Image (cartoon, rainbow, N blue to C red):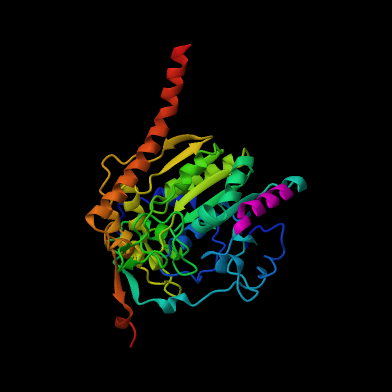
């Protein structure tokens, strides 16, 4: 929770005390980022530039995207200096 | 386990606070605004108050169906009075003796067109708050109309390309950042998303300088939907905008301009324009006009950054 000392409510429109709204943005995705762990040099550019900020550190070895919210924009794959992330069509994963 | 050779990028060190937004937020894939909006509270802390206007950011910041996307405090205002409302908020906090950071977060439509009078007035009165303009070069939320910061030649729904010699926007863009720096406010700066280290430093500096007066940040945030840009090229577009001097990075403390990044060999503007569909129709002659305009703005900026010290030197010689 934020250190919201002044307002109990966000305003007339919204209330931050309720559970936050959250869309199932993982459904929008047409391509999914797949990481080659051997190529990853742990620079953190994918985590930095991800607009949704869902690429998380997994131990001290690699980063991994939370696929339930990933919109599949492909910024992580584009910005990776070692091309360790490849965008692969969702069709290959759904049966 | 093999040892990793790389080092974690330094920019991650600035992101020390929690992300107040929920994970699935209704922005387009690859949206520059979403990255910016999540970075600001992570750098400045979650105890800021954001005021904003109807824009792409409003559905998320204001909340929908009586529920909220985030846990920050938000004050929704009209476009015509964005900076004036923030002024009132700041004065309330000052009278009540509450230490707080007010961030007026608006798009270029509010900052450059509709609310420019307010912005200029607040800058002239030197009100102590941070005004952030995220510049996506158009009214993207209402269907990609042109705004004051839309560059020459860009296609929008009100400046189309087609028959009768229509070739996108026919006039040049205004340089909002420089206009605000010329108000001689405490802090004015430009930043973009490709250099988040620089952006975070400028945000922190704005929070520091805010105690002395008005702070203005002009941030280029590409809009993949409106610009006809591939969603994965958002950051690359910012990078090329800096490398071609289309969007030079500088800061001005009390009106003294200093370049924070000098590009030694600027690339032709074509390397930037070829990324996106809104410039796809431009002929070589049109690109020349755009290039001339960019060179002119950069020369003015570069001149201002060195002129003052030389001018003072010349003045002191006459004594």
Q: Is residue B6 left or right of residue B191?
A: left
Tell me, yes or no, if residue B43 can be seen here.
no
Residue sitting at x 22%, y 55%: B284
**Residue B157: horizontal and vertical position, in percent?**
41, 68
- Tell me the quarter of the picture where residue B166 sits: bottom left
- Tell me the quarter of the picture where residue B122 sits: top right
Location of residue B129 with respect to B4 vertically, above or below:
above
Q: Is residue B318 left or right of residue B126?
A: left
**Residue B120: horizontal and vertical position, in percent?**
58, 46
Residue sitting at x 51%, y 53%: B112
Residue sitting farthest toward the front = B164
Residue B82 drawn in magenta: yes
Tell me, yes or no, if residue B48 can be seen here.
yes
Location of residue A69 with respect to B299 vertically, above or below:
below
Location of residue A27 with respect to A74 vertically, above or below:
below
Q: Say which of B297 and B33 sits in front.
A: B297
**Residue A66: horizontal and vertical position, in percent?**
43, 70
Q: Say which of B260 and B310 sits in front.
A: B310
Q: Main secondary structure of the magenta part?
A: helix
Which range of residues does the magenta coloring cover?
B80-93
Residue sitting at x 31%, y 61%: B279
Residue B89 drawn in magenta: yes
Residue sitting farthest toward the top = B319
> Which quadrant of the rendered structure holds the N terminus of chain B?
bottom left
**Residue B163: horizontal and vertical position, in percent?**
30, 69
Counting labels gives 0
């Amino acid at each position: 929770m934020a250190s919201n000392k002044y307002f109990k409510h966000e305003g007339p429109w919204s209330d931050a005390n309720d559970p936050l709204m959250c869309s199932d943005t993982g459904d929008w995705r047409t391509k999914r980022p797949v990481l080659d762990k051997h190529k990853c040099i742990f620079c953190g550019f994918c985590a930095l530039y991800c607009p949704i900020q869902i690429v998380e550190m997994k131990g001290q070895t690699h980063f991994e995207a939370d696929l339930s919210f990933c919109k599949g924009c492909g910024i992580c794959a584009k910005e990776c200096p070692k091309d360790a992330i490849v965008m692969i069509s969702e069709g290959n994963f759904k049966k | 386990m093999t040892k990793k050779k790389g080092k974690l990028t330094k920019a991650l060190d600035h992101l020390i606070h929690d992300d107040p937004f929920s994970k699935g937020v209704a922005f387009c894939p690859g949206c520059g605004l979403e990255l910016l909006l999540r970075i600001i509270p992570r750098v400045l802390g979650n105890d800021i108050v954001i005021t904003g206007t109807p824009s792409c950011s409003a559905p998320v910041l204001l909340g929908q169906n009586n529920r909220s996307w985030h846990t920050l405090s938000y004050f929704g205002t009209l476009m015509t009075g964005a900076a004036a409302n923030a002024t009132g908020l700041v004065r309330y906090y000052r009278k009540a003796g509450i230490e707080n950071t007010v961030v007026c977060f608006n798009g270029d439509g509010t900052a450059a067109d509709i609310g420019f009078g307010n912005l200029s007035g607040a800058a002239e009165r030197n009100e102590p708050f941070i005004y952030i303009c995220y510049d996506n070069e158009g009214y993207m939320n209402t269907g990609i109309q042109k705004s004051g910061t839309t560059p020459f030649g860009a296609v929008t729904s009100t400046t189309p390309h087609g028959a009768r010699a229509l070739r996108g926007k026919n006039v040049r863009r205004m340089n909002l950042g420089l206009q605000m720096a010329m108000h001689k406010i405490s802090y004015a700066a430009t930043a973009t998303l490709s250099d988040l280290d620089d952006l975070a430093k400028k945000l922190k500096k704005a929070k520091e300088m805010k105690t002395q007066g008005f702070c203005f940040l002009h941030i280029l945030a590409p809009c993949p939907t409106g610009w006809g840009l591939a969603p994965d090229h958002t950051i690359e577009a910012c990078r090329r905008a800096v490398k071609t001097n289309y969007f030079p990075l500088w800061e001005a403390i009390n009106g003294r301009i200093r370049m924070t990044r000098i590009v030694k060999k600027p690339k032709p503007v074509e390397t930037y324009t070829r990324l996106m569909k809104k410039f796809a129709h431009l002929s070589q002659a049109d690109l020349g006009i755009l290039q001339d305009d960019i060179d002119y703005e950069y020369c003015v900026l570069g001149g201002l950054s060195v002129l003052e010290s030389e001018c003072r030197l010349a003045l002191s010689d006459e004594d």
